[in-house]
Amino acid sequence: MVALAGSVCLAAALAICLYGIGASLYGVRAGRRDFVASGRRAVYALAGLLVVAMAILQMAFVRSDFAFELVATHSSTTTPLFYRVTAVWSSQEGSLLLWVLLLALWSSLILFMTRRRLREVAPYATAILLGFGAFFCALLVFLESLFAVLAAPPAEGTGLNPLLRHPSMMIHPPMLYSGYTLFAVPFAFAIGALVTRRLGSEWIRSTRPFTLAAWLFLGMGIVLGARWSYMELGWGGYWAWDPVENASLMPWLTGTAFLHSVMIQEKRGMLKVWNVSLVLATGVLAILGTFLVRSGILESIHAFGASTLGIPFLVLIVVMIGGSIALVASRADHLRSEHRLDSLLSREAAFLLNNLVLVALCFVVFWGTFFPLISEAFTGEEASVGPPWFNRYIAPLALILVLLSGIGPLIAWRRATAANLRRNFALPTGVAVAVLVGLIVGGVTGSLGALLMFVFAAFVFGALGQELVRGVRARRAMSRDSAPVALVALVRRNRRRYGGYTVHVGVAVLFVGVAASSAFQDQRLVELRPGQTQRVDDYAITYERPTSRLVAASNGRLERIDLGARLQVREGDGGPVRVLETFKSYFPSTDASLGPISRFFEGEATSEVALRAGFREDLWAAVAPDIGRLRPRIEEGDEVFANATELSREDRGAFLAEALRGLSRSYTDSPPPATFRFIASPLVTWIWLGALIVFFGAGIALWPAGAGARRRATATGLARVARELERA
Amino acid sequence: MAVLVAVAVLAIASPLRGGEQVSHDDAAQAERTELEAARDAKYAEIRDAEMDYRTAKLSEADWRGMDRQLRREAVALLHRLDELEPEP
């Protein structure tokens, strides 16, 4: 009954989308505001119905209602509550529902905010947003079985993929999907602006908070994914240029380019074709990103047909690309620039260069990601490119990007003179040179790329520090405030500028961390017996003893077996000894053909790394126990169980627990050598710290000005300009 | 669930119950909001130019020249706004 209610919600949602598209388009074409309002309300109703559908599914997961096929295949009674709640979007069906729900919520918000403005543009945007809604609802109604019910519900579910049992991995999809769906908003309004030929600043101004929020959420999702990779995947890295990672990076890069170049359009009426193309491309890449993650197409072109989502997504992407190109081409007259570039020594020129670098970065990522498909299509053989290929082209572009993030703020809009440039570049250049000399003297010369990144980052810090000091000084000269008060007032009155500067600082910090951890990492893969020591960088790491434990869930069922190692770490000669513990968790397989003991070692396994994170360096350790030595005992145990057919269910459970306890004791009593991966990686913490600074800066830029400030700004401007009118 | 769907349908249909509402001034309103957006962007440009001067990215002479030009452009936008019919 409840499942049926969920299905009815989805069907009604689809019908409402189709009605809303028709009502919005008819209303705007016939000049009927009542139909336009009805179309807008269709978006609100869509959001309401999808909230109900999500609530139905959430409750089923929380209650472990295995009558729902989705719950039975993605959760279990041993899954902790937090992961049961978030397991909804660990499935393809649940993630599609999350996508369209977030789309409906953000669409409702923007349409509510613009209900009295953009009266010509908003109905077309409504139709586009509901078009996306209809697409995803149709997938859920016709191709996916979100509320499928099992005739014979199992007593226990399959459980959540253990790799996803990490907080960042559960928050990562809502962040990513918020980014994708928020980028649908400027896409839709750009289409509306093109259709109506209302290509001024109003649609950009109205959608800017959503564009910035999309950029922020997508960035958070990307960083959360990197953090999960570093902590859970057991290889010690945070970015592997995996297609799934790249899928989220591409719209973030073009979105970054758009956020910069749109300022040129607002100020100078330039780059209109470029900007509208960027925002449309970002929307397409957001859909493409969703498609890549959910279709499995990048594993093989032959998987395309096997995925039910492949053809519909491809049709949608082709329609988006074709429609966008046709619209931009047909509105070329209305997209002419109002001005030309005054000077190559201007902030506009710096932003242009920044855009070219960002788009080049996106192209490199796109080419490397899709190369397997391209090569298979043309040669019949799948050839992939790995991290070395990406790094070869990304690294120099990233260097230019960081340098530009320091240069741009130092140059005035419209034109800068040589004297101005000398005055503004002197201090940052001095800081960069001082850092360069210091690094060379300190012997940090092992990597030219890393050295340049450190020097360019120093330039950025010098440039933005100078900007801040001069800004506070100027503010104090006008207001006589103390420095802290002047700083707050300065940032409050110039949120976009100083929010952007903060983001630039964060980006520089982040790339310093990436450069240092990539270029100066010391990694060892070794086999150790208890008592043996391995030196890594400045550390002496001793494998003290093995560890093992059986972990039960809250309902008493055995959830997993942990086999690991306790390590003693001494830094330098005579430093204090610290203890680290790392282990591998073995989750049971659901394959009934396996023996009751061996199924614990044939299912999923996750690495719990030992991490000593510091501002200067991370020490990372992961163990891979040699369970091969346990095989004879495992097989012996399976055989005993196979022959013990007379045991009752309770006795089998107790016997199994005792057998597993004995197995884990045998691992600690006579441990085989274990394989360890040790990594000493400098400045990894700077990556996470830089990301936090970036998010803080985006938050500053996103924070709305108070109504009083807006009125004051407008009234002040009016009064000042009016005085000029009188004098003119 | 039937109640929920009925509520949704009622909410969507309620604007239609008030009778036909024809919009006559959407184009004028769009023109006004475009000009207001352009005006606000121009004011932001005037403030940015002053900020650039006060943080030594522009000399005083360059700033005064730019400021005069920007204010002329702002005045032109205000004139265009004045020529539009007032908002109802």
Image: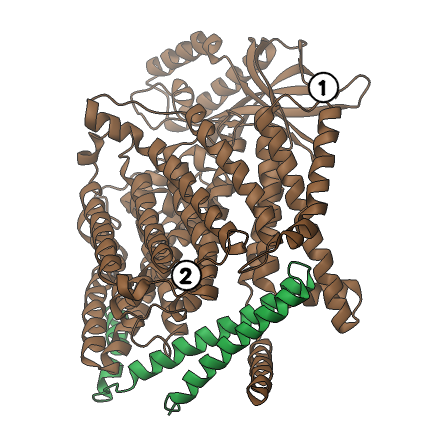
- Residue A681 lies, in percent from the top left, at 62, 26
On the rendered image, what quadrant is the C terminus of chain A found in?
Answer: bottom right
Reading the image, the residue beneath label 1 is A538
In this view, the residue in front, A104 or A709, is A709
Chain bearing mark 1: A
> What residue is shown at x 17% (from left), y 35% (from top)?
A305
- Mark 1 element type: loop
Labels 1 and 2 share a subunit? yes
Which chain identifier belongs to the brown chain?
A
On the rendered image, what quadrant is the N terminus of chain A found in?
Answer: bottom left
Q: Do the residues labelled 1 and 2 touch (CB within 8 Å)?
A: no
- Residue A669 lies, in percent from the top left, at 60, 11
- In the rendered structure, the answer to whether residue A283 lies left or right of residue A465 reads left
In this view, the residue in front, B27 or A47, is B27
Reading the image, the residue beneath label 2 is A270
What is the three-letter code of the residue carrying label 1? Asp
Label total for image? 2
Colour assignment, chain B: green
Instruction: Name which of mark 1 and mark 2 comes first in the sequence.
Output: 2
Disc 1 packing (10 Å; few <14; some 14–19; many ≥20)? few
- In the rendered structure, the answer to whether residue A621 lies left or right of residue A628 reads right
Chain bearing mark 2: A
Q: In which quarter of the image is residue A308?
A: top left
- Mark 2 element type: loop
- In the rendered structure, the answer to whether residue A566 lies left or right of residue A599 reads right
Disc 2 packing (10 Å; few <14; some 14–19; many ≥20)? many
From this view, report whether residue A423 is shown above or below residue A127.
Answer: above
Do we see residue A649 in this rendering? Answer: yes
What is the three-letter code of the residue carrying label 2? Met
